[in-house]
Image: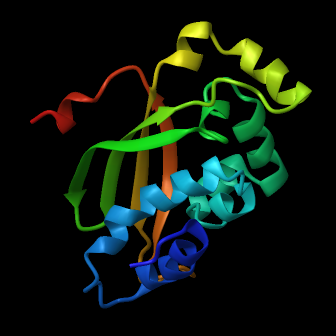
């Protein structure tokens, strides 16, 4: 299995195979996306967004601004740790994962310092929950059979459907 995010990203394209015989792929997708965020690789994260997600969050410059400046999403960037809390696959074409993100506590630049000041001191110290929602693209799409990110949502608590 690949050991770093660049190798993992290269293997992500196997997630487009009609023969979905590699069970680690869908389970690894969120981990890879979290690594990309930790490393500040916004364009790579955007490349793996579903067409619908790209339509609502793009172009990539707008997406980058959202990840780097929006108080709900900037903790994803350059975080110090990411841990899977729970996984759920409610259908053959939908996958959801709750991830606990530990944001970086110290900002590396004045822009980051300004952004971090917008986040409460509690959020800087405590891990935050995010739900990643992925879908396997339909056969008639340009990304036929690919698992792509439909949304990432900050969560106050683990949703009840994950606790069953």
Residue 23 on image: x %, y %: 25, 76
Residue 133 on image: x %, y %: 41, 50
Viewer-side residue, 126 vs 54:
126
Q: Quadrant of the N terminus?
A: bottom left
Instruction: Say which residue appears at 75% left-offset and 13% top-offset.
Output: 117
Q: Residue furthest left?
A: 164
Q: Quadrant of the C terminus?
A: top left
Q: Residue furthest top?
A: 121
Q: How many marks?
A: 0
Q: Is residue 28 above or below residue 130?
A: below
Q: Residue furthest right?
A: 110
Determine if residue 59 is in view: no
Describe residue 71's horizontal placement relative to residue 65 as left or right.
left
Describe residue 31's horizontal placement relative to residue 80 as left or right.
left
Quarter-wise, where is residue 137 in the image?
bottom left
Q: Is residue 65 above or below residue 142?
A: above
Instruction: Say which residue appears at 53% left-offset and 57% top-offset.
Output: 33
Instruction: Say which residue appears at 61% left-offset and 57% top-offset.
Output: 36
Determine if residue 137 is in view: yes
Q: Is residue 139 above or below residue 91?
A: below
Residue 18 on image: x %, y %: 35, 89
Describe residue 159's horizontal placement relative to residue 81 as left or right.
left
């Amino acid at each position: 299995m690949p050991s770093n995010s660049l190798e993992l990203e290269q293997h992500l394209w196997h997630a487009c195979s009609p023969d979905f015989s590699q069970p680690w792929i869908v389970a690894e997708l969120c981990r890879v996306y979290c690594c990309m965020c930790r490393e500040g690789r916004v364009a790579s994260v955007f490349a793996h967004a579903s067409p619908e997600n790209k339509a609502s969050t793009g172009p990539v410059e707008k997406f980058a601004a959202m990840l780097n400046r929006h108080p709900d999403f900037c903790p994803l960037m350059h975080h110090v740790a990411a841990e899977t809390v729970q996984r759920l696959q409610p259908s053959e074409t939908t996958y959801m994962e709750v991830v606990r993100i530990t944001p970086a506590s110290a900002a590396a630049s004045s822009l980051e310092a300004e952004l971090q000041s917008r986040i409460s001191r509690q959020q800087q110290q405590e891990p935050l929950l995010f739900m990643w929602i992925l879908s396997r693209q339909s056969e008639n799409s340009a990304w036929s059979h690919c698992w792509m990110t439909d949304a990432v949502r900050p969560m106050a608590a683990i949703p009840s459907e994950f606790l069953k």
